[in-house]
Amino acid sequence: MPRFDVTIAGELNLDLILYGLPEQLPPERELLADGMMLTLGSSSAIVAHNLAALGSRVGFQSRIGDDPLGQIALDRLREGGVDVSLVRRVPGSTTTGLTVILHHEQWRNILTYPGTIAELTWGDLDLNYLADSRHFHFSSYYLQRALMPRVTELFQRLKSKGLTISLDTNDDPEDRWQSGLQEVLSYVDVLLPNEREACKIAGTENAEAAIAKLATLVPLVVIKRGRRGSLAQRGKERVVSQSKEVVPVDTVGAGDSFDAGFLHEYVRGSDLPTCLASGNLAGAFSTTRPGGTEAFRDAAHRQEFFRQRGI
Ligand SMILES: Nc1ncnc2c1ncn2[C@@H]1O[C@H](COP(=O)(O)OP(=O)(O)O)[C@@H](O)[C@H]1O
Ligand SMILES: [Mg+2]
């Protein structure tokens, strides 16, 4: 039996979220927020944290700087039950990344200093550690600048050891949506984009056309559709799942939490309706507190929410 259910290699950093700023942000003015939260950020780390909260055994590899923000992020992940023994702390001028989120009523600004995120390299990874798992998940493809040229090789090596592989590209800050993704996709078992990302990856503005195209490239496409829930396309088979009713406080990290909920069931061999419902439940739950992991850190809150709305 492998040591882990899921291993993840990727970014580890904090999110600084500011709430209640004016809708317009004129330059040179002092603009006041009415709330703030410093919390675990980064898609990879949120997926890892929330998978562990759900009871999966998770191993995580990353590179952080030798700085206080990196330490806080690392402690959060460790406290969440994720194995972080092989996270590398690298002193130098590049510090741990940071994302600043300006939260508005209807939209948000997401400002990222990549820092060590873009410097995670092949040499930081221990393939034996990552392979000692049933499944490997990779997030934020377009932020992994240093690792990107070898992601295909990474997937290929892990697949040859019998792991299944999932990918959530998240956004491409350059909005180009290429960088060898087609080749990478040939090793992916589960692709987990939101609807917008699915269209961008497929190069079409039509969601149905995007799903049809992606379903020819990977065995299983799972599309996240915000408050409309999610759907899965496996070849010609389509499964649709409604979202869980919730009054969202903050949707930061909902997609990553969805990934955690979905993968927690997927690695146990559950059927697609169960995987989707688990993803929707985790995504909705994440919106009940700020950031991507605050809801999951509160075990009593989690048990109550899952008992009331469980699958
Ligand atoms: N307002 C909401 N109400 C209920 N569930 C939601 C809401 N927003 C997000 N979710 C859940 O979280 C999942 C991921 O959110 P989404 O916004 O689609 O992804 P991303 O954060 O990657 O853009 C959705 O598929 C849904 O299950
Ligand atoms: Mg996302």
Image (tube, helix red, strand yellow):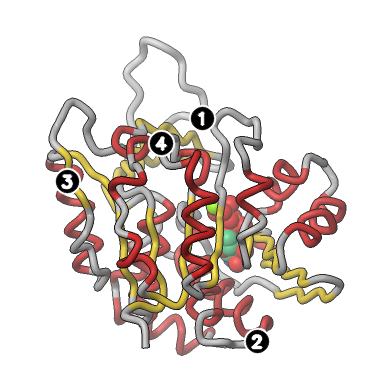
Amino acid type of the residue tagged 1 in the rendering: Glu
Q: Position of residue 279 (x, y in %)?
A: 56, 72
Q: Earlier in the sequence, mark 4 or mark 1?
A: 1
Front residue of 301/53: it is 53
Amino acid type of the residue tagged 3 in the rendering: Arg
Q: Label 4 belongs to which residue?
A: 146
Q: Position of residue 107 (x, y in %)?
A: 56, 40
Front residue of 94/281: it is 94
Q: Earlier in the sequence, mark 4 or mark 2?
A: 4
Location of ligand 1 given as a quarter of the image: bottom right
Q: Confirm or reject: label 4 Cβ below 8 Å from ligand 2.
A: no
- What secondary structure is found at the residue carrying circle 2? loop
Q: Label 2 belongs to which residue?
A: 271
Q: Label 1 belongs to which residue?
A: 23
Q: Label 3 belongs to which residue?
A: 89
Q: Residues within 10 Å of mark 4 (few under 14, many from 20)?
A: some
- What secondary structure is found at the residue carrying circle 3? strand
Front residue of 44/291: it is 44
Q: Earlier in the sequence, mark 1 or mark 2?
A: 1
Q: Position of residue 137 (x, y in %)?
A: 47, 63
Q: Confirm or reject: label 3 Cβ below 8 Å from ligand 2.
A: no
Residue shown at 44% from the left, 35% from the top: 145
Q: Specify the quadrant of the image occupied by residue 203.
A: top right
Whole-number angstrom distance, CA of label 4 to CA of label 1? 36 Å
Q: Residues within 10 Å of mark 1 (few under 14, many from 20)?
A: few
